[in-house]
Structures are given as structure tokens and as C-alpha cells.
Image (cartoon, grey):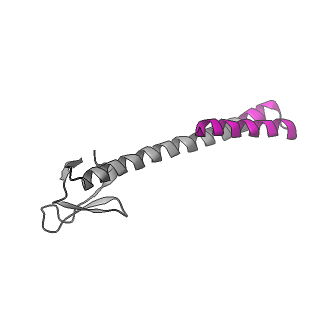
């Protein structure tokens, strides 16, 4: 739906430029392509951020359910790490061998 809305915005932009400016066709096409690339880039970035947020939510849910997580070369468990929800980071517990280590939830599988 967002892609369709983006294309509609670009089409409206081209229509306004076509009827209300004195630019030649080449200038209109270049301006429209610039706006199109900006809109598509924003939509692509939004998609990537949404996928990353979904991944982090999944990792945090699995941690809260007691599953073992593989984060790089570390094995994150509830006994060895605590979860900082605000920063979405796993922090090594003082009584474990991982004391002081911090791992971002986005780095986990």
C-alpha cells in the first residue's frame, strides 16, 4: 500500500510540474526521477527498519520464554544475562563468567 501511495505522490508531483511550470520535458523528467528515488529510498529504509524491529521483538520474546540465544560467539541465557528493555541489550550478570559483557539484541539469531 505504501508503494502505491508513493507512486501516486510522484504522479501528482509530475502533473503539477507539467501543468504549472515552464520547465522543459527533460527538466521535468529529471525532477520527477529525483523525487521518485527519494520516495522509494524512504520506503525501502522504512521496510528495513520494520524488519529489524520485528527481529528484535522475536529475539526478546524468545529470551523471555527462556530459550538459549546465539549472539555472535556468545550463548545468551537468562542465567548468564539480563535484558535491558530500553536499550534492547543483553548485559552479563555479575555472578556469571560474562560479567560486564553487553550484546545488542539485533546481533542475535
Give the magenta part as a residue range: 1-30
Residue 66 showing in the rendered view: yes
Give the camera-side residue of 19 and 80: 80
Identify which residue is drawn at 46% across, 46% down.
50
Give the camera-side residue of 87 and 29: 87
- Residue 77, horizontal then vertical, whole percent: 18, 55
Q: Which quarter of the figure has residue 39?
A: top right
Q: Is residue 60 left or right of residue 11?
A: left
Q: Is residue 101 left or right of residue 107?
A: left
Q: Is residue 81 above or below residue 7?
A: below
- Most prominent secondary structure in the magenta stretch? helix
- Residue 13, horizontal then vertical, whole percent: 75, 40
Q: Is residue 38 left or right of residue 58?
A: right
Magenta-span inclusion, residue 22: yes
Identify which residue is drawn at 83% across, 33% down.
24
The furthest residue to the front: 65
Identify which residue is drawn at 66% across, 35% down.
7
Magenta-span inclusion, residue 18: yes
Amino acid at each position: 500500500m505504501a508503494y502505491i501511495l508513493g507512486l501516486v505522490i510522484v504522479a501528482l508531483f509530475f502533473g503539477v510540474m507539467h501543468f504549472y511550470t515552464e520547465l522543459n520535458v527533460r527538466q521535468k523528467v529529471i525532477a520527477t526521477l529525483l523525487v521518485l528515488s527519494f520516495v522509494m529510498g524512504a520506503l525501502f529504509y522504512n521496510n528495513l527498519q520494520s524488519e529489524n524491529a520485528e527481529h528484535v521483538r522475536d529475539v526478546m520474546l524468545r529470551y523471555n520464554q527462556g530459550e538459549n540465544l546465539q549472539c555472535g560467539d556468545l550463548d545468551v541465557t537468562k542465567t548468564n544475562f539480563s535484558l535491558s528493555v530500553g536499550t534492547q541489550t543483553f548485559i552479563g550478570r555479575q555472578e556469571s563468567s560474562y560479567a560486564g559483557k553487553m550484546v545488542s539484541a539485533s546481533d542475535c539469531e
